[in-house]
Amino acid sequence: MSEALAVAGLVATTPRHLVTQDGLPITSFRLASSTRRFDRAQNKWIDGETNWFTITAFRQLAVNSSTSIKKGDRILVTGKLRVRDWDNGERSGTSVEVEADSLGHDLSWGSAVFTRTVMVRESEPAEQSVFDDGEAEVELEKELVGAKKR
């Protein structure tokens, strides 16, 4: 099963970052997502059930999230939902995973400062821009869009 999903929640585990032998960066962590509602009859907030997700980010999103996301942060995640049944012989269960397309801090709970990262390909020498600032910004945007498509 694979569905598009957006979920808000609390980072429940310290994000784990690794790079595979093929050079693929991966960051994963558990996310707890609970709903709350105000019960007018009882005049108090009622906690709903908590849904638990394993969030996995790949490539540049993995690199950026490994340095930006910490245990206890409130975040928003969009991605593809993957529900899988598993059995290891002794135990069986169901895992609910989100392969993240994007993620960031939930600004309903605080403020953040964004720092743009620029990927530099090691195979190409660094070039100095001959454009003025406005043109350089457009060229940078084109490079980033091209990099995301790869």
Image: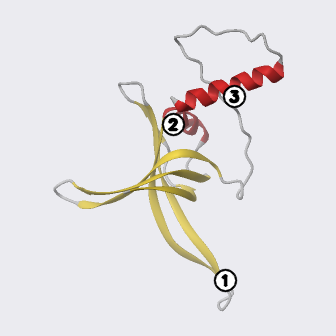
Q: Residue 44 carries which label?
A: 1
Rendered image coloring scheme: secondary structure
The one nearer the camera, 85 or 4, is: 4
Where's residue 94, x and y in %? Answer: 32, 61
Disc 1 to disc 3, C-alpha distance: 48 Å
Three-letter code, disc 1: Lys
In the rendered image, which residue does mark 2 sit on? Answer: 62
Disc 2 to disc 1, C-alpha distance: 39 Å
- Res 28 quadrant in image: top left
| Residue displayed at 55% across by 49% down | 71
| Residue displayed at 49% across by 68% down | 50
Disc 2 to disc 3, C-alpha distance: 20 Å
Number of numbered markers: 3
Q: Is residue 61 above or below residue 30?
A: above
In the rendered image, which residue does mark 3 sit on? Answer: 141
- Res 144 quadrant in image: top right
Instruction: Say if residue 72 shows up in the picture.
Output: no
Q: Is residue 88 above or below residue 113?
A: below
SS at mark 3 in the image: helix
For disc 3, the neighbor class at 10 Å (few under 14, some 14 to 19, many from 20) is: few
Q: Which of marks 2 and 1 is nearer the N terminus?
A: 1
87 displayed left or right of 11: left
For disc 1, the neighbor class at 10 Å (few under 14, some 14 to 19, many from 20) is: few
Residues tagged 1 and 3 counted as in contact (Cβ below 8 A): no
Three-letter code, disc 2: Ala
For disc 2, the neighbor class at 10 Å (few under 14, some 14 to 19, many from 20) is: many
Where's residue 45, x and y in %? Answer: 64, 79
SS at mark 2 in the image: helix
